Amino acid sequence: MRRNLYSRREFLDTVSRAGSLALLATGSTRAVAAPKAKSPNVLIIQPDQHRGTVMGCAGDTDAITPHLDEFATSGARFTNCASASPVCSPFRGSFQTGLYPHRHGVVINNIRMAPELRTFAEVFAEAGYATGYIGKWHLDGGWPKVEGGKGVKPKSVGGFVPPARRQGWQEWQGYEKSHEFFEVWQYDPEGRKERVAEYNWEPTWQTDVALAFARRHSQTGRPWLYYVAYGPPHLPKQCPQRFLDMYDPASFTLPPDVRKRLPKSREAELRTDLKMYYAQVTAVDHEVGRLMAGLGKLGVAENTIVLYTSDHGDYLGSKAGANGRLRGKGTPKAAAFRIPLLVKWPGKVPSRHVSNELVSSVDLAPTVLALAGLPVPGDMQGHSKAEWCRGRTGHHSEAVYLQIGSNTPVPPEAIRPSRRQHAPPGMRLIHRKPLPAGPALGAEAKLMERSGNWDCTYDETLDVVLQPGRHRVMAEAAGRGRIEVTYTLHDYVDRMPRFQIPTNKALVFKPTGENEFHVRSDGTTTNAEGLRPHLYASGERHNPPTFVLDCRAKAILRVHAAKSVGDKSNELRVYVSEGSGPRGTVRTEAAATKTMGWWRAVWDGRFVYRPGGKGWLFDHAKDPHEIVNALNDPAYENDLKRLRRLLLAFARETGDPVLEDLEKMVGTELGK
């Protein structure tokens, strides 16, 4: 019988023995060349949401990052590295492919990256490298279903990524998306979760796996590429106590923009968040130190390229104001798009080297390939910064092109229901009621752990009369919130419950129409696969469950919603099908034709310019904390002309579909 619990020693032994077996599940059919003699190893370290300025070596006196500081001392630090799209999935797609999001297609979170795209890992694999990946992938689309396992609590974290969609990463300990750092688990080859015993902090386990990989392949003489995608300092607010104890909330220095915009009533909340965030950064720093020490003990540090970066930054109060979220990303604000970039390779990358060269996340894959001496595919849009890493002069970027979203349709799983403008196809809105806002409830409101959300008491019941036939029903909460929805079917004559749809289950949306859950009037059900607990979070970028009911007689469907968590914009919406129709003709959710909101911006190291009605121009030389919008200041007229030219040139040269819209925006600004 297969064991589902591993001790730390058993796990490491298993990893070491199973290395060759992992190569059988690569999903790659391309020819593999023999590696060059003494080809360098490559280690990528990419935590989630590490703002580029939160390091001691970057001048942050509050940050305790001795190992990252030593990393910078022994290698190169780039002061002007930017995430071309400062949210998780688009950045990861760009790093993997060297393409802008509008080219690789992952323009927002939760879109699956096309498997035919060539990644830098595939280039390494074809050159004979052993490749491995651990941590958050976030390029397989959708939202992880609630799943558990022996020793693992059922949660909506994880997401098994099949071998065919791992795109060059041979030895795989990745998952689609998981923000749970205390409970450590892994997937077995069949996609079942299993608890990894003796670990209670995920980054520690990930570091051990990475070093086991390096040890195994270094012993065989085969060069390797490994990618460690740590979860912190992203939410949730989880961190070992010893790192939390290093920080006093009262000691943090709040920057001018935070002091200007944040009410005093929220300062204590922010300082608590800063304590957690900085402690998580220090916890990641500790793992970086373990990795560097481990490479040294293996005797491979001298021949290993190590690159440290992150997918995006964090506002940390710089954009909150009175009611906004204290933490976040996703805009062309420096706090969101500026990320760390450290590169180390003893003897090849000079120590204490600081470069002000502009680097975009689309440049990372070409840079890693060039440093390792491998060819950069011609279709990659990024440029290698390898020469800058070596202390020389290489390709110079005049600016960095920043973006999120597109004006082209996105897959259904990427649509946030709070942005729905019309009823789903074949359905009509029958109920719409505002939900209470947290601050207005006074004593009834309880501030939740996640900044900006309020726990509100809410209880709403709606009876829907259903004629004989088939019906589709869907309930959702608009805005950033959660609702718990239960459905009970009642006989129309005596109004006594005939049966109840399982209250602890609901469907994960699937774009193929597999989100139908058929309930017959005798209480039996069909299509019961892919179920998850009925808590539905509208902040998640997928649609709520659609229930399909077969009614053989007139009935009443009772929809009950409770325990809303959200902001002032929340409301409960209930949709039903427009007509009962004959059996078997119910329409499934149509393919999405909705386009998401989008923006484009350009940053030249001094100015960040975003066009349009919500646009801005910030001069980082005079206003590093982005307090004064100089978009309409005549003193910057010449700078704006240059930045507009750069913006349109980027859109044109990269094949951005929003080019025409950008030209109209710029024309409007110029009064044309």
Image (tube, rainbow, N blue to C red):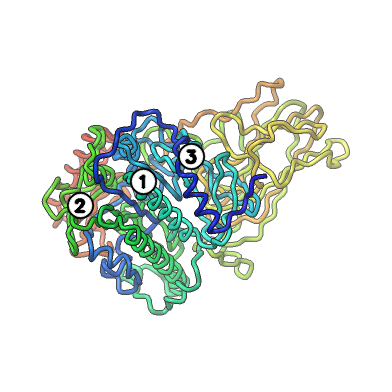
Image location (x, y in percent) of residue 497: 83, 42
In primary-sequence order, the first of circles 2 and 1 is: 1
> Where 264 sits versus 603, above or below?
below
Q: Is residue 227 left or right of residue 426?
A: left
Label 3 close to label 2 by CB (< 8 Å)? no
Tag 1 secondary structure: helix
Q: Label 3, on which residue?
A: 21
- Dot 3 crowding, Cα within 10 Å, few <14, some 14–19, many 20+: few
For marks 2 and 1, give the CA distance. 38 Å
How many numbered discs sit on the rendered protein? 3
- Dot 2 crowding, Cα within 10 Å, few <14, some 14–19, many 20+: many
Image location (x, y in percent) of residue 260: 34, 70
> At label 3, which amino acid type do we have?
Leu
For marks 3 and 2, give the CA distance. 41 Å
**Which of the 4 image quadrants contains residue 108?**
top left
What label sits on residue 358 in the rendered view?
Answer: 2
In primary-sequence order, the first of circles 3 and 2 is: 3
Badge nearest the viewer, 2 or 1: 1
Residue at (65, 40) in percent of width and height: 531
Label 2 close to label 1 by CB (< 8 Å)? no
Image location (x, y in percent) of residue 181: 51, 59
> Where 86 sits versus 497, above or below?
below
Tag 2 secondary structure: strand
